[in-house]
Image: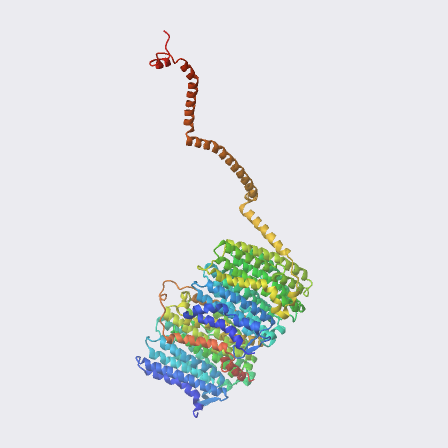
Amino acid sequence: MMDAPLLPLFILLTSLLAAPILFALPERAAKLRTAINLGMAALKVALVGWLSLKVSQGVIYDLRFEMLPGLEFKLQADPLAILFIALSAVLWLITTIYSVGYLEHGPHRARFFGFFSLCVAATVGIALSGNLFTFLLFYELLTLATYPLVIHRGTAEALRAGRIYLIYTLAGGLVLLLGTLGLWVLAGTTDFAPGGILADMAAENRLAAQLLFVVLIGALGVKAALVPFHRWLPIAMVAPAPVSALLHAVAVVKAGAFGIMRVVYEVFGIETAQALGMTAPLAALAGITIIYGSIRAITQDDIKKRLAYSTVSQVSYITLGVALASPIAAVGALAHLIHQGLMKITMFMAAGNLAEGLGVKRVSQMDGVGRAMPGTMLAFTLAALGMIGLPPLAGFVSKWYLAQGGLDAGQTWVIALLLGSSLLNAIYFLPMLHRAWFRDAAPEGEGAPGRPRIGWMLAAPPVTTAVLVLVAGGFANAPFSPLEWTRFIVAIEYQE
Amino acid sequence: MSLLPYLAALGLPVMLAVLLTWPKMRSLVWRIMPFAPLPALALALLGDLPMNAQAEWLILGLHFGLDEVSRLFVIFTGLLWCAAGASARHWMRHDPHATSFGVLFAMAQAGNLGLLLAQDALSFYAFFALMSFASYGLVLHSRDTEAQGAARLYIGFVVLGELALFAGLALAASQAGSFLLADLRSAVPSDMAVALLILGFGVKLGIMPLHLWLPPAHGAAPVPASAVLSGAMIKAGLFGMMTILPLGGVAYSDHGTVLMAAGMVTIFAALLLGVQQVNPKAVLGYSSVSQMGILVLGLGAGLMVPEAWAAILPVLIFLAAHHALAKGALFLGTGAFAAQTGLASKLGVTLALLVLAFILAGLPASSGGLGKEALKTALEAGSPVWLPWLSVALTLSGVATTLLMARYIAMIWHNPPKAPANPAAEAVLLPFLLVSAASVALPAVWGTLAQTVAAPIRLAPSGALWPVLCGVVLAAGVAVFAHAQRIGAGVFLSQLTAPFRAFGARADAIVAAKRRAARRLGHAVPKALGDTATRWRLGQSAIACLIALTLAVELGTTQPAETAISPVPQTDPILLQDLIPTPDF
């Protein structure tokens, strides 16, 4: 088609243009709002499908607008961008359906869906950014767009959580701004390019390059919830379930992880980063985060909090895979970007269904919920077993590649780390499954009698994503699976 | 070779599990459940070896295949799952958690058959995990305190085993540069990888000290589940070691030594722990642990001396089949026993169980005796230092098993497991008798079944009777001693002399009875006389007679004189005055 070069821009606009329309719609126009939401989301999935077909055929999209001399607004669609954008497009569609069901009679729906669209637009922008400057713009937009979603309920607790969220992420954004400026000064450009743009400069000025690495990764580490900067994530759990789902699976956390990938692979280049001696500390930090998050998860009784600490742990698999500097580990890391997204969104939507359908919000209330909501809990079970890393679920595939990558890089401790993490995952997920399936519900309690009434808009999305978890793992070797795509990306990033 | 037979073999149990969630299909699914392993059995019995098939698009590329080893494993595993399925159908008929049991039963079955058919590390691991995790629900089934404790222990060890297995497979695959099992087996993995694999499979096999989960789990699970847990699933650990460890390649003498030492300890320590159990199924569980110790001896010898492996492997397959059938039958028989109500049928089942117990203990010419002798022969190719010890251990294991079996037989009478409320006794009995028959017939059919690997069994001597006899005598002795201990020596002695005293008392009683009879006779004559006398009014008659007689005599003596004085003129007033003595005036 003739408008093909502008395809990335159209994809961005599907959600960016939807936002003002949704804001403008009156609160009562629920049907129209739903139509716009779902229509745009479906349109985006179609466009992303088309785009990924084109990119897989070797077409590179590159759109630039010069904003200041030497400072460009640049959109590009490379295979790495496709990976993230495909995840966000598919999960946006599913989460939109879920949100419509979840907020069916809630207040402030215009506001909610407006910011929801804006948040997804920012994510798409982050994925398509062709340089760090553009990335920074969308990264800040993401912070601002998610804040109203976190405080959507307007309770004192929500406001407090929002404040903490804002402090962390804005501080991170500020540091990222500094880093971007530093990069611009040092390299004269902020473009992302396979193999990095800092190879020459790092050889000349090692200390400055190391400092830049620390600043950039530190800034991105806030959203990626690396250990000293992770505190906001469990607190932000007061947000409504679909927001938590999106936050954990696609938007905020993944934006951080994706940024780390871009910075390590395409700003520094994996060889340069390794030469600077920065990958080993990053891997160690990721390792600490993985174990710390899991240990904290064990003691959480609140289901969403437990899931949040689990996210802290699981997202660092991605960072770990990047930092191991082995192409095999990189495949695991990139695949986990998708796999963790699918698993975690399933679990959050399932947790939302438990709260909506049965009023169950705590692990200790989960007795017998499997019998009451079999579909939802089956989805939850698949996702949890995937997190533990059982084949043929998606989590196993990424874990297997991380293990093989660790051995490939000569880092045998990665095996021990993965074992420890799996063990901890088992410790905090298996009791939930035990309660859900093998215990009988307490005789009294609000949810006990009768089957809970939840509409298909709540019931179907977690089941769909759970099926995707099964498919992504079970058909990992099939063409166009996330794993195949990540192999394609890694071949580019490692310039094989 | 097409993929289709493999998909059918594994798809049928999975499909049954899925269909069970649909209430309308439940009764049909339970009806089909016993036949779920049939596609796999058909594949193993009718297929031409080797049958490799692959699905590159599944997970990270699945490879299926059957070789001489896995074929035999599929046959006995499938048979056991058939019998357990038939038993489960009746066992679960009125159980409130029947559906949950059925789903997990079918999933565990798919995992168990799948891991036997897998030819690459990832699908093996996938099926192994499916089997292990699905069995959690089987152990927990009754939901009582005992089952909850057993299930918690079970899942802990499963997670431990799975982690060790993951790490071991990841290391081995990385070192071999491939994840095909054939490549792993022929590669030289690091010591660490081998140790992790042994740990991972050792949990399933119950090598001490990794056995802790096993007896409680087998004790707590319902009968059909414990039959497959102990008969079929335990063998997955053995199968994993046999197909993944680099046996027959490079010597791993440290690992071999550790395994053999663990095996030795396991054989006899399981006896000591097992005889203290009250639950008959837990006793059987310990017996399984003890028997696995025997198999571990073979594995250890193979790791230590690779040249010996070619001789050991066929024997281990036979021993695995032997234990699977005998132990599976014993577990099913425990259920069959519990389901009987009459004394005669209980005694009948006990008799059948006794036969199985003797087979397990190694009765000469039974599968147990043959297998043990064949293993002894095969181990001769192994380490000469260990050989005498192994030989002694194998012989004594017969004594140990006999003792455990004696305990088991005693405990099914004392403490039989709970049977379902409304047991169909014949339906529970049939699968038991089927597997028992298979167990008895195993030595006879092994030649045609195993073909190329049957030679060591065909040539094996039938084995000695004395360990079993020794076990029986010891068991009897122990029973007597324990009895004496329990009731105190004095009471026991009095119990010992009781038969003699009883005999004496009986004789006394006979004499007394005779006396009584005589006395009765003595009493009887006068009484009879008396009776007759009464009947005939003898006394009165006699007196009457006497009077009559006296009168007659009187009359006889006075008549002539009267006639002599008859001419007396005055007779009329005289008669009375004559009678009254007249005083002398």
| Viewer-nearest residue: A311 or A396 | A396
Residue drawn at x 45%, y 76% is A467
- Residue B96 x, y percent position in the rendering: 42, 63
Residue B359 appearing in the image: yes
| Viewer-nearest residue: B3 or B221 | B3
Relative vertical location of residue B187 with respect to residue B379 in this rendering, above or below = below
- Residue A184 x, y percent position in the rendering: 48, 85
Residue drawn at x 57%, y 50% is B479
* Residue with the most extreme right position: B384
Relative vertical location of residue A393 with respect to residue A41 in this rendering, above or below = above
* Residue with the most extreme front position: B567
- Residue B266 x, y percent position in the rendering: 59, 60
- Residue B450 x, y percent position in the rendering: 61, 69
Residue B196 appearing in the image: no
Q: How is the image coloured?
A: rainbow
Residue B582, quarter of the rendered image: top left
Residue B400, quarter of the rendered image: bottom right
| Viewer-nearest residue: B304 or B431 | B431
**Is residue B77 toward the left or the right of residue A252 in the image?**
right
Q: How many marks?
A: 0
* Residue with the most extreme bottom position: A2
Q: Quadrant of the N terminus of chain A?
A: bottom left
Relative vertical location of residue B435 with respect to residue A345 in this rendering, above or below = above
Q: Quadrant of the C terminus of chain A?
A: bottom right
Relative vertical location of residue B474 with respect to residue A459 in this rendering, above or below = above
